[in-house]
Image (cartoon, coloured by chain):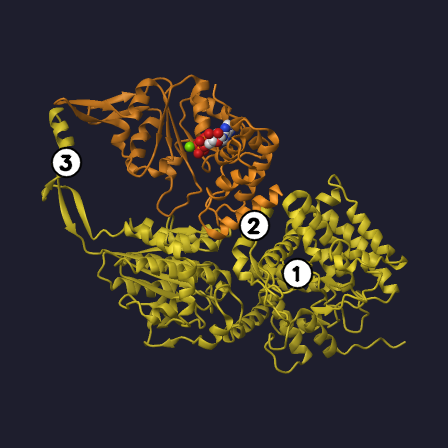
Chain colours: A orange, B yellow
């Protein structure tokens, strides 16, 4: 089974929500374990998982499906959402605010007690199979004038707020994921947390858990700690010359 | 026995010297003690901590070259979001960390940066450990320089040791500094003190902090100091006094009190401080407390703030009655400030508030009239002085109404907005910003490039020059599937007229002085550099009014103005001055925009705080009027957006009230403004 280290009671909350067919919203900064958590929960609940990474061009039709021409015939192809509805899967829409707004409109009837997906083109209304669940995620850190989750949408979901875990848990995760020893992981976590102090004060976001795992993997692969930190915690976080210097200083201060 | 007489003039002078305040700072000619006291009080209450500079050679590494880097590092290490501002010697007011503008000559970049880092660590250590939070301790320190010095030396070794224990890399940095000649020059207040001839009783206090003093071991006279140092060094990570700043502070205070007695017996003054350790300025922190309390309560609670202030000052010994023996030995002079102030401020009025307000208004007026020359990164003070010009009105102005929410009606023609050319200066500062930000500008231009939509394919047309293949296929699919197809299957090439225009209205009110203004300036230049490659009609204006009814708006670049020498000069030489009567400014900007032929008119307001001006234009009144102005201009087809540099958590509430949900962006840090402004614009236009 895939490794997931719970931070708090999120597993319990998710399980209960799933049992009651309540859709779930995961919010939190990038690389803090949201996707991992969904994969883990899908395995735990024994349900298939359909993941959709949302981006600007993603329209409702991409989710529901469309007619295609195949050998002179028109054939209907299910989109990922329709597949999930039919299979009783967990449908995970990652970074949902990025998608076009009509995406939310098709999601709505699936999130309340109707649990239906109208397919206008086919002229049918699919009822979701037992086990189907909508999970969406978004990163409130990318605060933007134009993109924001609507209040009415937000209120349709059970929300789980994610953040980077505390020192010990995060070190444990890094050690386990990269297969390195705990002492190394602890040092990396201190660096990561230092950089998070600059979140939206010079750095968009601090180092994610994912980045720390990368750094640990590089060290395990034979790079020196300094070089590994340089390649991940310094250059992956910023292009700005002065922030680069500051991050280097941080690495030096922590590692000695 | 007759009471000892102290001439007030002398002690006042001494106080002013001690704080580095000159008569000019206080805006007084004759130093009548009465006037001077009020001025001194006003100075502490209403002026930002003064960034003073010591005389002497300061040709080392300039702070502004490393300020951003240093600030980022210290923020990451400490987890506190303070700003670095400028003062010599270094100090902190628990909000910002003040470091000298430049290191002493000669310039040795590596050493100087190291020195800045450790100076910063000491000050951040004070902030982070909350050593200077207790009012009672601050009051003690305020009263007595000997106590303050001893406390400082003990606290600094504790702070530095904790940094070293926490970060291995810092430990080696900290260990190097005591060997640096420039770091270890000794001072009492701001006076340099020769290092040889330092009394033995002091010597142990410098152990490990200034190495060149340790050639001599102190005899028995040094015992108490040795003992205190030992006690501080003996603290172990498990001890409460190691972890908890409040516990530590009382320990240091107790030790310092013992040392004071000892030094007094030996007839010694305060032990001098090594330059890199900076100074403790309880008066800044107390004045800040006073200022905060005063601002918050001022009109709401009548005389309360004055009372709190007075009692805070009494605790500091400032307010001892004339003739009474001064409780703090040779601490602060007794000026009898309390009684005089009471008399001067209360007058016949029942409440102190109006008098207090009058004092502040008067002070601010003075400040506004003679803008103080302050250092800000990126601007040279001399330049600003030489080239700065007051607004030259070049139009008769336009009158606007103001919304009075209490009366539920407009105050007709309440303000007149006069347009004038914005402040100008040298083109150098423009070039400097451009050179320093080459990469960002390239990036902005690259991103803006995508906005060039003058020529494009219009998809989904009922008729057009070519078939839109994707749509055609979809239509065929629909027909085959027995559905009603969408017949909009053509596309058409179109040369589109520019439909967007934008006016950026930037806040240069007095409160932006310093970091904010610098960030705004950079943002304006970067934004302009991006915009000029596109053909969006755009304009830049600045606001900040010195008069409540006749308010000036600075034209940096008008819509029809082409980029010329003058525009560059104005863009890069913003000058902070005045208040924020925002409603009128928005109305005027709306007026300018509503005359534009473009269909989409965007008004981008960059501001750092609430709308506030003299009189009743503050609080709810200012907010309601500005909100009304936003509604008015939006009815005229102007989309008003705001980027706010007010990072206080509750600022969202008034911003939402004024601009509406989703129409403002609250930046937590001014530093990100140059990057975010073009981004927000792109998001709006795309
Ligand atoms: N709680 C956790 N348990 C296990 N691994 C984690 C955890 N949190 C983060 N990770 C690690 O961080 C990586 C990134 O997490 P991911 O779920 O992709 O982040 P997100 O979806 O929030 O951007 C994962 O691949 C995993 O290695
Ligand atoms: Mg993810």
Front one among B213 and B26: B213
Q: Earlier in the sequence, mark 3 or mark 1?
A: 1
The CA distance from mark 3 to mark 1 is 73 Å
Position of B165 with respect to B301 (left or right) is right
Q: Nearer the viewer, mark 1 or mark 2?
A: 2
On residue B469, the disc is 3
Q: What is the x, y in percent for residue B620? A: 46, 58
On residue B73, the disc is 2
Q: What is the x, y in percent for residue B10? A: 74, 78
Q: Residue at x 35, y 54 (%)?
A: B442
On residue B286, the disc is 1
Q: Is residue B205 above or below residue B580?
A: above
Task: Tell how many labels.
Answer: 3
Question: Pointer 2: residues within 10 angstroms few (<14), some, or many (20+)?
Answer: many
Q: Earlier in the sequence, mark 2 or mark 3?
A: 2
Is there a contact, CB below 8 Å, between mark 1 and mark 2?
A: no
Q: What is the x, y in percent for residue B685? A: 29, 51
Q: Quadrant of the N terminus of chain B?
A: bottom right
The secondary structure type at the circle numbered 1 is helix
> Which residue extends farthest bottom?
B30
């Amino acid at each position: 089974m895939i490794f997931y280290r719970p931070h708090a009671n999120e597993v319990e909350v998710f399980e209960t929500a799933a049992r009651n067919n309540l859709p779930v919203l995961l919010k939190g900064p990038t690389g803090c374990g949201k996707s991992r958590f969904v994969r883990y929960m899908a395995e735990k609940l024994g349900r298939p998982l359909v993941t959709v990474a949302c981006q600007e061009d993603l329209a409702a039709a991409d989710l529901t499906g469309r007619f295609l021409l195949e050998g002179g015939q028109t054939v209907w192809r299910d989109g990922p959402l329709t597949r999930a509805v039919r299979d009783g899967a967990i449908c995970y829409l990652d970074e949902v605010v990025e998608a076009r707004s009509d995406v939310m409109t098709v999601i709505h009837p699936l999130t309340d007690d109707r649990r239906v997906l109208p397919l206008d083109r086919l002229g049918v209304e699919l009822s979701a199979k037992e086990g189907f669940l909508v999970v969406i995620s978004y990163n409130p850190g990318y605060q933007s004038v134009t993109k924001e989750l609507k209040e009415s949408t937000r209120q349709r979901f059970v929300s789980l707020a994610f953040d980077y875990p505390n020192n010990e848990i995060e070190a444990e995760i890094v050690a386990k994921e990269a297969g390195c020893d705990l002492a190394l992981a602890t040092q990396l976590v201190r660096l990561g947390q230092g950089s998070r102090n600059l979140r939206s004060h010079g750095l968009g976001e601090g180092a994610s858990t994912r980045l720390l795992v990368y750094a640990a993997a590089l060290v395990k692969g034979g790079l020196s700690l300094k070089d590994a930190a340089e390649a991940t915690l310094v250059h992956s976080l910023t292009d700005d010359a002065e922030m680069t210097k500051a991050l280097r200083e941080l690495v030096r201060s922590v590692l000695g | 026995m007759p009471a000892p007489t102290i001439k007030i003039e002398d002690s006042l002078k001494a106080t002013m010297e001690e704080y580095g305040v000159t008569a000019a700072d206080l805006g007084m000619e004759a130093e009548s003690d009465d006037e001077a006291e009020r001025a001194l009080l006003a100075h502490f209450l209403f002026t930002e901590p003064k960034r003073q500079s010591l005389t002497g050679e300061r040709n080392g590494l300039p702070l502004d070259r490393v300020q951003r880097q240093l600030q980022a590092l210290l923020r990451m290490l400490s987890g506190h979001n303070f700003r670095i501002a400028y003062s010599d010697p270094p100090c902190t007011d628990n909000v910002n960390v003040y470091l000298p503008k430049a290191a002493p000559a000669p310039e040795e970049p590596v050493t100087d940066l190291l020195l800045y880092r450790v100076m910063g660590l000491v000050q951040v250590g004070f902030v982070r450990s909350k050593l200077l939070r207790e009012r009672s301790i601050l009051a003690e320190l305020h009263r007595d320089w000997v106590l303050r010095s001893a406390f400082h030396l003990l606290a600094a070794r504790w702070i530095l040791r904790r940094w070293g224990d926490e970060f291995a890399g810092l430990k080696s940095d900290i260990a190097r500094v005591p060997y640096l000649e420039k770091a270890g020059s000794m001072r009492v207040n701001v006076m340099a003190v020769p290092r040889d001839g330092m009394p033995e009783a002091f010597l142990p206090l410098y152990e490990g902090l200034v190495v060149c003093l340790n050639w001599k071991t102190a005899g028995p006279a040094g015992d108490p100091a040795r003992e205190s140092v030992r006690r501080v060094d003996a603290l172990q990570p498990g001890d409460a006094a190691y972890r908890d700043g409040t516990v530590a502070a009382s320990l240091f205070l107790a030790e310092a009190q013992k040392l004071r007695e000892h030094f007094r017996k030996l007839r010694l003054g305060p032990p001098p401080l090594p330059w890199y350790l900076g100074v403790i300025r309880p008066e800044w922190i107390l004045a800040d407390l006073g200022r905060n309390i005063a601002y918050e309560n001022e009109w709401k609670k009548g005389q309360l703030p004055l009372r709190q202030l007075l009692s805070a000052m009494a605790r500091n010994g400032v307010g001892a009655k004339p003739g009474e023996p001064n409780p703090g030995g040779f601490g602060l002079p007794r000026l009898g400030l309390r009684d005089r102030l009471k008399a001067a401020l209360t007058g016949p009025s029942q409440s102190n508030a109006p008098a207090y307000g009058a004092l502040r208004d008067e002070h601010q007026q003075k400040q506004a009239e003679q803008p103080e020359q302050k250092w800000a990164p990126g601007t040279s003070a001399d330049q600003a002085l030489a080239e700065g010009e007051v607004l030259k009105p070049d139009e008769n102005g336009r009158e606007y109404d103001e919304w009075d929410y209490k009366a539920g009606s407009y105050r007709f023609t309440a303000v007149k907005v006069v347009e004038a050319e914005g402040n100008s200066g040298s083109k150098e500062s423009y070039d400097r910003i451009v050179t320093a930000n080459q990469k960002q500008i390239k990036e902005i231009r690259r991103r803006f490039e995508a906005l060039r939509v003058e020529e494009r394919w219009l998809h989904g047309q009922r008729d057009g020059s070519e078939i839109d293949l994707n749509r055609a296929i979809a239509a065929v699919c629909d027909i085959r599937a027995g559905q009603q197809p969408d017949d909009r299957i053509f596309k058409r090439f179109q040369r589109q007229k520019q439909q967007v225009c934008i006016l950026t209205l930037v806040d240069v009110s007095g409160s932006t002085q310093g970091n904010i203004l610098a960030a705004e300036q950079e943002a304006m230049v970067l934004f302009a550099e991006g915009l000029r490659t596109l053909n969006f009609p755009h304009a830049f204006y600045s606001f900040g009014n010195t008069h409540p009814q006749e308010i000036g708006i600075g034209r940096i670049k008008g819509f029809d103005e082409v980029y010329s020498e003058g525009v560059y000069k104005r863009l890069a030489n913003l000058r902070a001055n005045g208040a924020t009567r925002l409603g009128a400014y928005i109305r005027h900007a709306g007026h300018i925009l509503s005359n534009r032929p473009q269909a989409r008119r965007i008004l981008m307001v960059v501001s750092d705080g609430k709308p506030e001006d003299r009189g009743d234009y503050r609080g709810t009144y200012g907010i309601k009027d500005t909100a009304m102005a936003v509604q008015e201009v939006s009815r005229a087809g102007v989309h008003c957006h705001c980027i706010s540099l007010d990072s206080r958590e509750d600022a969202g509430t008034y911003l939402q009230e004024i601009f509406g949900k989703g129409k403002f962006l609250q930046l937590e840090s001014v530093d990100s403004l140059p990057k975010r402004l073009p981004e927000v614009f792109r998001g709006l236009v795309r």
